[in-house]
Image (spheres, rainbow, N blue to C red):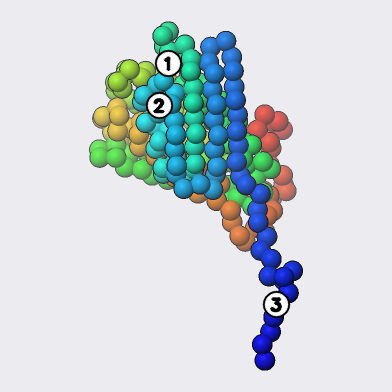
Amino acid sequence: MIRIRSIASARVSISPPRTGEVHRVTGETDVHVALDLDGTGRCQVATGVPFLDHMLHQLASHGLVDLKVSASGDTHIDDHHTNEDVGIALGQALAQALADRRGIRRFGHFLAPLDEALVQVALDCSGRPHLSYDLTIPGQRIGTYDTELVREFFVAVVNNAGLTLHIRQLAGVNSHHIVEACFKAFARALDQAVEIDPRRGGAVPSSKGVLERAGHAG
């Protein structure tokens, strides 16, 4: 006996796309960011800050996020405003993509080695911004990039995406290795945290039944 399934029973529910797009224009910068959390690591970035471009490639590649970033800014002064505003726009786009954060695993953790460097990242998509940052970067610059800007980038992302983020350096003497290990660990931890957990059935991953929305602290 041949059984024919009805079209209705054969339908597969399709989740809405988890994407975000932000165009931020100030008197100092013009930044556009688009991302897809369920991507394959495709990356198109041009910020005018070469080392930041390199780190954004790490974020996309190791986090399996499709990422497009274009930015122009007052880099003739220094890279600070462009670096910060890219972080702000990226955080806002991430918050858009996560929406009310239903169904995600929420927590992520990764320990990334890069030669002698070893960096640990733990994060919670809690909706409550917090950064605990513990990198000791020996060099003041990597290429033309001021290494103080690494912390400023993550401050901007955390505050606008609503992440609780802890970054710990366990080893490392090479500035490039330390920072790149940090971005790779962040990418992998983020990938874990935003992954959909099928056992949750689309529920908010909180015993309270709600997570704060970025920019709406409670």
Kindly identify which residue carries mark 3: 5
Q: Work out whether 87 lies above or below 123.
A: above
Amino acid on which disc 2 is placed: Leu
Report how far apart the C-alphas of labels 2 and 3 lie in the structure: 52 Å
Q: In the displayed structure, does residue 108 sit left or right of residue 114? A: right
- In the rendering, at what x and y percent does residue 45 appear? 44, 30
Q: Nearer the viewer, mark 2 or mark 3?
A: 3
* Element under disc 2: helix
Q: Residue at x 68, y 60 (%)?
A: 13
Give yes or no for contact between labels 2 and 1 (Cβ–Cβ under 8 Å): yes
Report how far apart the C-alphas of labels 2 and 1 lie in the structure: 9 Å
Q: In the displayed structure, does residue 213 sit left or right of residue 196? A: right
Q: Residue at x 69, y 66 (%)?
A: 11
Report how far apart the C-alphas of labels 1 and 3 lie in the structure: 60 Å
Q: Earlier in the sequence, mark 1 or mark 3?
A: 3
Amino acid on which disc 1 is placed: Asp
Give yes or no for contact between labels 1 and 3 (Cβ–Cβ under 8 Å): no
Q: Earlier in the sequence, mark 2 or mark 3?
A: 3
Q: Residue at x 60, y 25 (%)?
A: 23
Q: Which mark is residue 79?
A: 1
- In the rendering, at what x and y percent does residue 44 appear? 44, 34
- In the rendering, at what x and y percent does residue 4 appear? 69, 80
Q: Work out whether 53 lies above or below 203.
A: above
* Element under disc 3: loop
Q: In the displayed structure, does residue 176 sit left or right of residue 166? A: left
Kindly identify which residue carries mark 2: 52
